[in-house]
Amino acid sequence: MASVTLKNLHKKFGHTTVVNNVNVEIADGEFLVFVGPSGCGKTTTLRMVAGLESISDGEIHIGNSLVNDLPPGDRDVAMVFQNYALYSHMTVSRNLGFALQARGVVDREILHRVQRVAKMLDLEEMLERKPKQLSGGQRQRVALGRAVIRNPKVFLMDEPLSNLDALLRLQTRKELIELTSDLKNTVIYVTHDQVEAMTMGHRLAVMNKGEVVQLDTPEKVFNEPANRFVAEFIGSPPMNFLEGQVSEKSQKKILKTDSFDLVLSESMNLISGSSVIMGFRPHDVKLVSEGSLGGRVTVVETLGAEKLIYLQVGKNSLSILVPATEKIRSGDHLQFEINKDYLHLFNRDDEKRIIFSEPN
Amino acid sequence: MKLQISIFSLLRAFVIVLIMFILLAPFLWILLASFRPNMELVRNQSLIPNTLTIENYVSLFVKSGYWQWIINSFIVATYTVLISLPLIVAGAYSVYRTHYWGRNALSLFLLSVYIFPTALLVIPIFRIFNGLSLVDSHLGCALLNTAFAVPFGIWLLQAFLKSLPPELEEAAAVDGVGRMRTLFQIIIPQAAPGIIAIAMFAFIVSWTEYLFAMTLLLSNDLHTLPIGLTGIVFGQYRVNWGFAAAGAVGSAVPVFFLFLIVGRWFIRGISAGAIK
């Protein structure tokens, strides 16, 4: 068990910077998720921690030691790869025990630990099988077992669930959460799936274009996204955005967009004339019979318990979530209200979140 | 509709048979020719034999030095495989995995071995090998065959290694498995099908090699199959076609069965995880 510190971490491939000044402190036993779109540098960051990628600049500490120049095998980390990287010519049992064998652990101890891990991951029946004879989920568990058996300081996981089908992914996600919370090892997890990130991570490091744009708990990232990118990337269905300008009318701040005008709550003390981007999530909208906001339904998507409605409001298409019991058809005209407590405002120029001081 | 399909499949079957015939006809002709008297082969070149005889095989197996040549060929080919495989594996792994200055240039330069017409090399090589006391020895012959098998083998195997997922080695590296252990216990078993193919390639290079064997193996009792057979096939005044055909069959069949057995054994080895 150990903490991991990434300090001013940079990675360049030629003239392209793929990881730019990443600073993250991961506490002992923490489950930290790097999340972001493909090409954002999250996997490269993980590979630098593993020692599979050289560091262009910056420092990586595992526990109290600087590991920049340590080979992967000396860092006491274990990695689970997206494609599992199982040794197809070895049985499950040998796959699990191989690293221990290479490290000179005695056979009896290897056998003992293989059996314990197999029991933990429900692989006891499969120990003599080859990876080829296993299902996707079982292979995934073998890959996990190969990491667990070493009891390393840190688990590094590179999209370990992305090759599983939807149902199995849900189930494995739950098992992985249980397993890692039992083991209490530090986990660094990489995914592009924001739901996976939200459900698994103690904290998320949201990455975009090589930089960590927000490092916080899932709740904070969801409720107080640091910028428009985070707001758009985290949360499904994604947030609605409208550009507008603040004006003042009879001592009330009004946000004028090209679709509608919205009276802002008093706590949002913006300067008149400032350009902002307004964001609200589809579920922070309520249908009303009488209201100032309205639009025409263009598409209705039934999601099960809810319906996702696309509304044409002026020039903009907005999405709102309503209970599936609402009888709505495309072409209908709907009136709605936005819950202003969950309104997100971002500066138009740098797209950063506008933070209002809490009223005393 | 149904008729159309059957006509199409009939046509397809015909084309396949035709192509197979074109490919296999020379082999079939050789096989048939090996059972025909030489005089008939000289006069009548049709595919269908008039008379069948085993006289060619009697000459081959009983009257010629066939068994000695087979053993010699086998010794030289085995030496060649044993010497060239470690070099090919090490070379291919080096080209594929390690980083050093001039690596790419070196890997391309390897193939330049094949630029020179081998006939030009005969005399210098004879002088060099004579100086090293490698003339008239199977080992010398195998060393030369190795020189010709290794560059292409490296080129072939590194392409095969590139097709392996790099995560296999990365997983081993993170697990603290040393380079050599990774090479021997992960890369080589994973590349086994490629390595087997290359071993077969090296074996055949040696098995069919004529020019250098002819130059280096002076004593009759060291002759390999190609030298031995040509000595008899091309008599002083005439060519013994029947014997040539029997010789061709007699040199191909052992290799054919060897590969069948070795191939199976290797494949079983891989699936049992026995190759370490």
Image (spheres, coloured by chain):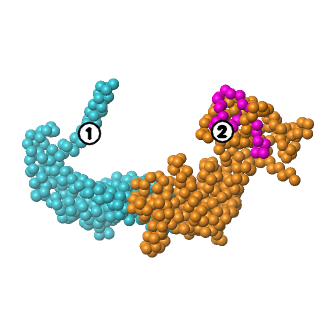
Chain colours: A orange, B cyan
Q: Which residue is mark 1?
A: B20
Q: Quadrant of residue A319?
A: top right
Image spot of residue B14 (x, y percent): 26, 33
**Residue furthest out toward the right:** A250
- Provide the residue span drawn in magenta: A317-346
Residue type for callout 2: Pro
Q: Which mark is residue B182?
A: none
Is residue B267 among what the camera can see?
yes
Q: Quadrant of residue B75?
A: bottom left
Residue type for callout 1: Met
Q: Chain of mark 1?
A: B
Marks 1 and 2 on same chain: no
> As rendered, which of B75 and A31 lies closer to the eye?
A31
Residue A325 part of the magenta segment: yes
**Pointer 1: residues within 10 angstroms few (<14), some, or many (20+)?**
few
Residue A230 vertical position relative to residue B126 in the rendered view, above or below: above
Image spot of residue B103 (x, y percent): 50, 58
Q: Which mark is residue A323?
A: 2
Q: Residue at x 43, y 54 (%)?
A: A134
